[in-house]
Amino acid sequence: MPENVTFHFDVDGENFTSAGEASVMVKKKLRQLGLPPEVIRRVSIAMYEGEINMVIHADGGDADVTVTDDEVIIVLSDRGPGIPDVGLAMQEGYSTARDNIRSLGFGAGMGLPNMKKYTDSMEIETEIGVGTKITMTVKL
Amino acid sequence: MKIKEIRELLGAELLCGEEYLDNDVFSACCSDMMSDVLAYVKDQGVLLTGLVNPQVIRTAGMMDMVCIVFVRGKEPTEEMIELASDCGIVVMKSRYRAYEACGHLYTAGLVPAPEDK
Ligand SMILES: Nc1ncnc2c1ncn2[C@@H]1O[C@H](COP(=O)(O)OP(=O)(O)OP(=O)(O)O)[C@@H](O)[C@H]1O
Ligand SMILES: [Mg+2]
C-alpha cells in the first residue's frame, strides 16, 4: 500500500480575503487522489468551517491534512485565545462573533456543530491564552 | 431546471460558466449568511445572495453548489469570477432583489434546497 499523503498549509489570519483558500486546495487534491465525492464533501465542509474559525477567532494557524488507507485526518492548530467553555461553544447558535464578522457572512454559531456533524470523530484541545487544536477524522 | 432557464427567469447577466448552462439544477437557497448555507443546505443547488466576497464562492465550492446568482445587481470582483471559473461554478448577476428573484424561481418550480440532517 502507498505511503500516507500529507498536506500542510499556513492559514493567514491577517486578511479575511484569503480565508478558505486552504480548504479549496485540499478539495482539489482529494479529487486528484480520486476519493469518493461524499468523503470529499464532508472533509471540505468540516475543514472550511475550522479554517474560517481560525481566521475570525484566532488570527490564523496551521492546517495539516493526512490521507491514510482508511481515513482523512484534519488537524487545525492555532495560537489564538483558546475556547473558555467548549461545551457552550459546541452549542448551535452560540457565537462570540461581532457584527463585523456577521457582515462577512459568518458568525451564526453553527461552525463547530457542523464540523462534528460531518466528521466521524472530532477532538478539541484548547487552553486559554495558548491556543486551540482541533483534530477531525473522516472514514473512507 | 436548466441553468440557462435561471438566467432567463432572472434576466441575469452571465459572468462565467457558459459551458455549464445546459446542466440541470434541482434546488436553490438564498442567504447572506454563509454559516447558514454551510449548516443547512444539501448539495448541487443554486445559491442566491446579496453578499459579495470570496467566501461566497468558496462556500459554494465546498458545498458542491453549481451556480451563484448575485442579486440586487451586486458586482463580484474579477478575482471572485476567476475563483468561480476555477471551481467550475456558474456566476451571474440579476437586478432583482432577493425576494423577487426567489419568487420567480420558486414559481417556475425550483424547490428549496433540502436540509442535510
Ligand atoms: N479556533 C478558535 N479559537 C478561539 N475560539 C474559537 C475558535 N473556534 C471557535 N471558537 C469559539 O467558539 C464559538 C463557536 O464557534 P462556531 O464555529 O460554532 O461559530 P462561529 O464561528 O461564531 O459562527 P459560524 O461558524 O456559524 O460562522 C465562536 O464564536 C468562538 O467564540
Ligand atoms: Mg465558525
Image: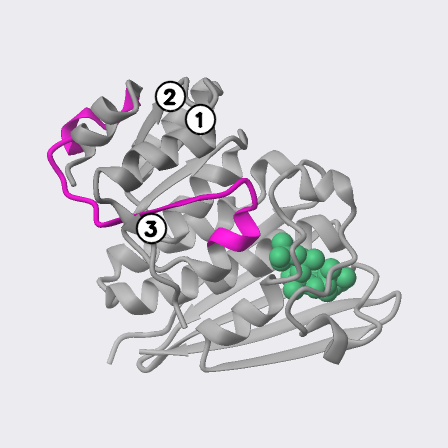
Identity of the residue drawn at 34% across and 54% down = B113
Quadrant of the rendering where the N terminus of chain A is positioned = bottom left
Mark 2 to mark 3 CA distance (whole Å):
30 Å
Please tell me whether mark 1 or mark 3 is closer to you in this view: 1
Please tell me whether mark 2 or mark 3 is closer to you in this view: 2
The x, y position of residue A69, in whole percent, is 31, 80
Q: Which residues are magenta?
A: B15-37
Q: A136 or A102: nearer the eye?
A: A102
Which mark, residue B71? 1
Local SS, label 1:
loop
User: How many other residues sit within 10 Å of disc 3, few (<14), some (14-19) or many (≥20)?
Assistant: some
- Where is A4 relative to A45, above or below? below
> Disc 1: which chain?
B
Q: Which residue is mark 2?
A: B94
Local SS, label 2:
loop
Identity of the residue drawn at 81% across and 67% down = A82
Local SS, label 3:
helix
- Disc count in the image? 3
User: How many other residues sit within 10 Å of disc 2, few (<14), some (14-19) or many (≥20)?
Assistant: many
Relative to A13, B59 lies left or right: left
Residue most extreme to the front: B107
Amino acid at circle 3: Lys
Mark 1 to mark 3 CA distance (whole Å):
28 Å
The x, y position of residue A96, in whole percent, is 79, 57
The x, y position of residue B11, in whole percent, is 28, 18
